[in-house]
Amino acid sequence: MSEPPDTYAVLNAEIQPQTMARLLSLHDVESGVLVCHPVPPATAAGNLTPDVLYALGKHPSTRGWPRNPRAAERSSTIWLQAERITDVLLLRAELFAHTTLAELVALNRRAGARTWLIFDSLTARRAAASHLGALLATQVQITPRGDQPSTPTKTLTRWPPTSPWLARSSATRAFTVDQLNALDARMHAAFNNTSSWLSAQRQLSPEATERFLALLTSDASQPTRYARILGASSALLLHGIASEIHERSGRRSATARNPTSEQAREIRRHSNPASAALKAITMLTDIDAETLSYLTLDQLIQTPRGVVLGDHLLQNSSAAALRAHTAHQGTQGQPSTVPMFTRRQLAENRDARQQKNHQTAQRLDLKLAALTGSLDLTFPQPQLASDFRGPAEDTYQEAQLIVRLPSPQPLPSASARTSSERRTRRRATSCRG
Amino acid sequence: MATSVFDPPVRHHASPPGVGIIETEGLLLSERSLHYVIANRLLGALTGVSGTGKTFALEELLRGRQDLHVVWVEVQVKPTMLSIARSIAMALLGEIPKGSRHELSYHLQEVLIDQPDGRPLVLIFDEAQRLNRECAEYLRYLHDPHNTRFAMVLAGGNGCWETIRREPMLHSRVHEPVFFKPLSDAAVLQTLPNYHAMYRSAEPELLLRINQERCRGILRHWSAFTASAAQLLAPSERLTKETAAIVLGHPE
């Protein structure tokens, strides 16, 4: 069966304000319909990408408005996909040259959207339809969009139970290389980020620690969450803390966050994906700027209903902003384990909350105890508040044993360490706060 | 955004002393048309022969209206879309935002709305006969979208209506256009006594002769004639044949 055509040419013979108003009223980004009312071009060979961005709600007064055509085109593609636009209507199509219209059709095609070219002139419509291979249509017919996942989430079902310390060897047998790499990356990211966070803390309280770890270990599936928990546990051990971290059974699902129309407008004004994503997170979650600096990109979990971040399910315009941010980072060649936002991005968007009244996530059952008298603890060990519950005795003893094991050889002096070791140590101990 | 009340000085051509405002047909029709266009945020047009009082009517009807936010833009000679956008921005915002024509247009779409207190925004384009096709397209672009909400009035002399009619996208959008015409003989005799004291007891034949020879029903010409005659007459003195002949340039 052949694919349905993706370009249509429609005649708006009645050049009345009422018909224009009817066409404009079809604009509904949330439903995937974008009506582009272009600035009349000075010459027919105009550029439509700024008009597409403006129709998407972007505004030139915000940071990162793309000012060269190629950047505008890249940005348009990302945002059309992020907003899951299925139909783009261009009004006053007769004002533009066929090459300009062809560029718009190609842009929409790349983003998976159909193009409806609305002409006021019969002859212009016929000529353009012939040139572009567009189907002549008597009216615009939008098929309602069903919610579809943009990226299918890989299902990782099997995960070996029992010992948290010996999971890796079992994992190599249980998973494919790709699956293992994906888990490994998450474990590594959780390890690094937990270590950085611990290095910046003088004292740990149960609420703040649980909140941070709950966010850091959030993920799409149980195995990937478990991989993150393992990474976090290893980092805690490195900082002289024995831990037992479990997901509570019957945990509540992520809370849906749907922006109001005013919030949606604010989020959509940003053409820069990072700014839009930060605006969305700031408006709709209680995640503060410091915590954000420890999160990695792969903690944005795309689902058919929106994007999950920690205990929040961000929807509509906010989900689009996070999808766009992920896609933009992908186009920059960034792996998913890089920090979600750079320090500069966080600094540039100062309205990211510094501190906020947090709701306790209560997703994790967290038990921590400081390991005392360890021989080789070179990483900062924060003080634990007295109201922490401790792990089981055997877990504590096992952890104590690991950190008390004398090194087979004395550690080399700092000057004798390899540059690779120094880099690793610096990275692990760097404070991101 | 500038929010001061529209308050231009009363301008009679040649500024003759002691003249009053006369209620021409054009002025009365403009009042009704403007009321409708502003109430519904539509596009209106005041056109007709030069000197028949279009600009005067607009200024008179909008002067001091605290219930409106009036923005007056005089269309330049050979305008471009960018020059129109810049003129609107300057008149509306008191500054021209930086950026390309696209960026400026997006800014304008955000500010071409009623005032926060609900006062309607009224955008007047004087000398609209200078608009070319691309500028007409541009005005339509600004006025059509859902997110803008303002009344727009095009006022222009010779060729203005032809310009509007030439552009179907503007023509089909104009509500209750007002066509200013030269005063008929009857209108001259009826209205001039209210215009200046010198005409109150002047002979009708004399007024018709002046109208035929010089003024041709054009208010601007009557204003110039009145200014010249007033220099030869004492205040409230009646216009005589002799004085008229001097002003007309052929003393008896």
Image (tube, coloured by chain):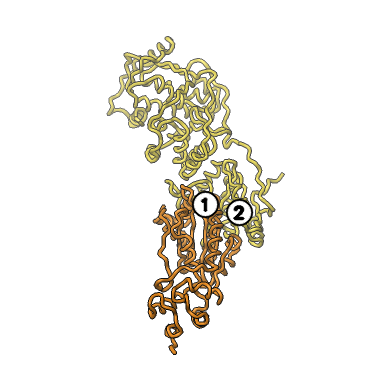
Q: Can you give x and y, in whole percent of width and height, for residue B178 in the image?
A: 56, 65
Residues tagged 2 and 1 counted as in contact (Cβ below 8 A): no
Q: Which residue is mark 1?
A: B148
Chain assigned orange: B
Tell me the kind of residue under disc 1.
Thr
Chain label for disc 2: A
From mark 2 to mark 1, how far is it between C-alphas?
14 Å
Chain assigned yellow: A
The quarter of the picture where residue A422 lies is: top left
Q: Can you give x and y, in whole percent of width and height, for residue B91 in the image?
A: 42, 58
**Which mark identifies residue B136?**
none
- A127 or B137, nearer to the observer: B137
Q: Residue at x 48, y 54 (%)?
A: B121
Q: Residue at x 57, y 36 (%)?
A: A151
Q: Which residue is the extreme one toward the bottom?
A: B252
Chain label for disc 1: B
Q: Residues within 10 Å of mark 1 (few under 14, many from 20)?
A: some
Does residue B247 appear in this view? yes
**Dots 2 and 1 on the same chain:** no
Does residue B182 appear in this view? no
The quarter of the picture where residue A290 lies is: top left
Q: Which residue is mark 2?
A: A20
- A357 or B54, nearer to the observer: B54
Q: Residues within 10 Å of mark 2 (few under 14, many from 20)?
A: some
Apparent side of residue A195 relative to residue B32 in the rendered image (left or right) = left
Q: Quadrant of the N terminus of chain A?
A: top right
Q: Is residue A43 above or below residue A288?
A: below
The quarter of the picture where residue A100 lies is: bottom right
Q: Can you give x and y, in whole percent of width and height, for residue B30 in the image?
A: 54, 63
Q: Can you give x and y, in whole percent of width and height, for residue B158 in the image?
A: 53, 72
Q: Secondary structure at mark 1?
A: loop
Tell me the kind of residue under disc 2.
Met
